[in-house]
Amino acid sequence: MNHITKPLSAGLYFVATPIGSARDITLRALDILASADLIAAEDTRTARKLMEIHGVPLNGRKVVAFHDHSGEGSVTGLVELIATGHSVAYVSEAGTPLIADPGFELGRAAIARDLPVTSAPGASAVLAALTVSGLATDRFAFVGFLPATKQARETEIAQLRDLPFTLVFYESPKRIQEMLVNLADILGDDRQVVVCRELTKKFEEVTRGSLASVVAAFEGRHVKGELVVLVGRAGATDVADGDIADALRDAMKTMRVKDAATTVAGALGLPRRQVYQMALRIGDIGDTE
């Protein structure tokens, strides 16, 4: 495959890489990897293998390590390289840099020097999981990994309990059962949860249901692979269309359609767009977002 190898402007390029299937990479990402003066990678072996799969030659360019354990000197060196007119592409081991992956300090340092920072977006386990979850996606909160200790983990879950967002977590296979039990203890057995395992890979698996049913489904299992856990937002229960319509009619007596939809959606834990469309039908008006 031929890639565009015209010189890149000096700057830092955060490049998203596949989370499983090697084909889930953008053409622009490949062009940047083919053209950057230097490639910094969380895992140099993974980066080299990805470039080899897609026929991106190094032609003598360096691939250097940059990860959570890289010191301040590594940040300074990369920033100085950019400041002297070079392009640096940064890739995490999988997915989008900075999303529970390294790159934050490097980006901050480049921005502090008023150097260009560019994103080449692509694969993200967070967005992939939201897409297949069946949970509301109009508002979500990415939490990342919960604390490893039981007490700290339960404290954080309790702080998140009443947020009106779909909650998105990462978790390790070794702790998934314990995490699900903690969620059920604090959020209740009926709260909806989705566990996504090995997204985009050969053994992709999505488990949906109440916390009680999903806890039972994972009990005694020894799972492998990357896991994303999504929890339905507080108050997100099944509500009959008639009850939604009644709440909207009442709210629309004193509010505009948009405001009534927002209020009712928040009160019932439903996606705002769904409630707004119903409000438009009830009001028989052509109001738009």
Image (cartoon, rainbow, N blue to C red):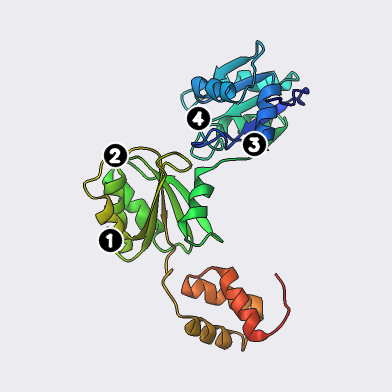
The reply to whether callout 2 and callout 3 are in contact (CB within 8 Å) is no
Residue 179 located left or right of residue 57: left
What is the distance, in whole Å, between disc 3 and disc 4 at their CAs? Answer: 16 Å
Report the quarter where the C terminus lies: bottom right
Sequence-first disc among 1 and 4: 4
Say few, some or many: other residues with alpha carbon within 10 Å of mark 4 (under 14 / 14 to 19 / 20 or more).
Answer: many
Q: Residue at x 42, y 48 (%)?
A: 169
Residue 52 located left or right of residue 80: left
Q: Secondary structure at mark 4?
A: loop
Q: Secondary structure at mark 3?
A: loop
Q: Residue at x 60, y 69 (%)?
A: 273
What is the distance, in whole Å, between disc 1 and disc 4 at their CAs? Answer: 34 Å
Q: Position of residue 142 (x, y in %)?
A: 49, 50
Residue type at mark 2 is: Lys
Sequence-first disc among 1 and 2: 2
Sequence-first disc among 4 and 2: 4
Work out whether 97 lies above or below 187.
above
The reply to whether callout 1 and callout 4 are in contact (CB within 8 Å) is no
Residue under pointer 3: 26
Q: Secondary structure at mark 2?
A: loop
As drawn, the residue found furthest toward the top would be 60
Residue under pointer 1: 212
Report the quarter where the N terminus lies: top right
Q: Which mark is residue 174?
A: 2
Judge by depth and name the residue closer to the eye, 121 or 109.
121
Q: Is residue 140 something one can see in this rendering?
A: yes
What is the distance, in whole Å, between disc 1 and disc 2 at their CAs? Answer: 19 Å
The reply to whether callout 4 and callout 2 are in contact (CB within 8 Å) is no
Residue 248 located left or right of residue 119: left
